[in-house]
Image (tube, rainbow, N blue to C red):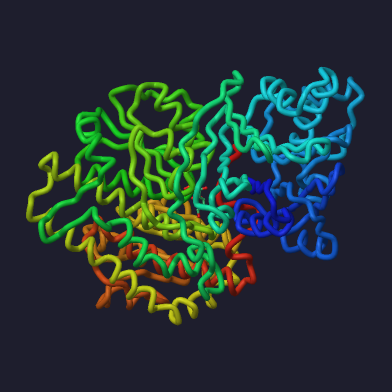
Amino acid sequence: MCGIMAYLGNQKAAPIILEGLKRLEYRGYDSAGMVMIPDDSLVLFKKKGKVSQLEAAMKDHQPKATIGMGHTRWATHGVPDDINAHPHITHSGRLAIIHNGIVENYSELKTALLKEGYTFKSETDTEVFGNLVDYYMHRDETSLEIAMSKALKKIHGAYAFVMMDRQDPDRLIVAKRQSPIVIGIGDEEFFVASDATPIIQHTNKVIYLEDNEIAVIDRSQGLIIKNYDNRVLSKEVHQLDLKLEELEKGGYEHFMLKEIYNQPQSISDCMRGRVNSDESWIVLGGLKSSLDKILDCRRIVMIGCGTSWHSALIGEYLFEDLARISTEVEYASEFRYRNPVIDSNDVAIVISQSGETIDTLAAAELAKSRGAFVYGVVNVVGSSIARMTDSGSYIHAGPEIGVASTKAFTGQVTLLTLMALMLGRKKGNISQKTYKKLISELEKIPSYVSEVLELTEQIKYIASEIKDCPNALYLGRGYNFPVALEGALKLKEISYIHAEGYPAAEMKHGPIALIDENMPVIVIATNGSDYDKVVNNIQEVKSRKAKIIAIVNRGDHVVKGLADHVIEVPETLDPLTPLVSVIPLQLLSYYVAVMRNCNVDQPRNLAKSVTVE
Ligand code: AGP
């Protein structure tokens, strides 16, 4: 999950690439670099650390080159340092390469190249591929494009490569398999990037490179795209509907806070044009065209990673509760390798904010190869997962830049709720009266979320109470069990406090041994069928002297008498509770991370889109 940015055109490449890398930094930020061809030499800058450090290193010498490429790294092979940072220059000094992905068989290739007298500066798999291209180019006295095509046939793994030849400063060669590449088409200039965010300020015309395709970008001949059999392909030019201001912080201190506060809007956007409580209808275009497929299926398998897996868990509860369709949930990384039983009787619903998570993409491809109907619930339009599914629905949450997913989670849950309601109604499991009640309550959720967002000061105070605790336990039941998992994930991934989420009743089967006065326990105790049982669990925790923080509905007096802190949220119908109960947990983790001086938008070791295994 690195960020790639390349430019060929009539402007100075350096500032364009630097700006692009900053917009891609959420994909990886342990080191950054750039290489340009101002004449017939390769001018290279690369630094451990963030793009700003690369920018500082280049301050007084930005060559006038109009061709170049840059990279911001999330380390896979080789520690983050100046040497392992991309770009890499090949053994002959002639070629430059940047890469997002993993070359699985790099070790054996490196051994063979060492025997050919090749030398290596870094520990990276990227340099190995670059030298393999270099080897073919010199052995066969051929062009970079041909040499690259030969080398691509020798490697296994996921990649987005961009290469340049210092003897040919008018050409970029791009190759793609599994890792994303978007090519922006400007006025006699081209932009190559890992996604559209650094392109939109230059052009809204893009082409998405597909797997096993090579793009040759030439100053005079323009853009030519071929498959690995060297056949020229004609590709659709897409019009981006991304807006530049969506990529700015808009006055917030962090993207994450902006995205938390954007949720009333993003939840509304997810429902826009899809819901009408007055006339009691829900229409999802992607679902409508595949309704019979889903209604007649044997079961649904919901697949995702991280927060998207939590959304899938809520989806399971929704689909079984409201649509009475047998539903299972799978971690994509497990599903893809465990030889699962899945076939044409099944439907796979793959959930992904980025639409680029390699495990989720591979799981979707496996399900499809076994005959299952694959439905995507995705945020990024035109992403790899969105493009490979049989059908799907976008959540329309807008760009989510903060590594910790917030508005994408509530967008995913909103969409899964719409799907469950639509399917439940079609199956006759939901009466018209209940349908209308749930729809009209769903339309109120954005205003409920706005009300919770006003509890900032109280949540800040609670954050100050737990910010130095080494551990935390999150408990919830029913629809709130996956919310407890999500709250724990938020806390651990941005504040580095170890946190676990558990079904409240499970606590007695082990975790209760952890509880003492140093363990904050965050319990979601909103009104619902299991409320009394959750109250019992709170009493069990209290008797072990834990500090109890409870999310309750307004007017709750029972839990208020037990907990150290209660955060009161508007009451809603049980199936819709996650959309409200998660908000205070997002804010709590955000303020704890800020108070711990953590890098909220770019937490250590993480990246926004996990495009490598
Ligand atoms: C969530 O806060 C994390 N950043 C991470 O778990 C994320 O949800 C996961 O990597 C899946 O990403 P996706 O939704 O883009 O597939």
Q: Is residue 535 left or right of residue 497?
A: left
Question: Can residue 166 be seen here?
Answer: yes
Residue toward you, 372 or 452: 372
Total count of labels: 0
Residue toward you, 16 or 98: 16
Q: Position of residue 154 (x, y in %)?
A: 70, 20
Q: Position of residue 525 (x, y in %)?
A: 32, 65
Q: Is residue 20 left or right of residue 259?
A: right
Q: In the current view of this chain or complex, which residue is farthest to the front?
A: 220
Residue at 46% x, 51% y: name it. Answer: 240
Kindly indicate the quadrant of the structure image that contains residue 109: top right
- For the N terminus, the quadrant is top right
Question: Can residue 512 be seen here?
Answer: no
- Vertical side of 386 occupied by 133: above or below: above
Kindly indicate the quadrant of the structure image that contains residue 406: bottom left
Q: Position of residue 85 (x, y in %)?
A: 77, 47
Q: Position of residue 226 (x, y in %)?
A: 58, 26
Residue at 8% x, 49% y: name it. Answer: 431
- Vertical side of 187 occupied by 561: above or below: below
- For the C terminus, the quadrant is top right
- Vertical side of 18 occupied by 262: above or below: below
Residue at 35% x, 64% y: name it. Answer: 581
Q: Is residue 170 left or right of residue 425?
A: right
Residue at 24% x, 69% y: name it. Answer: 571
Kindly indicate the quadrant of the structure image that contains residue 145: top right
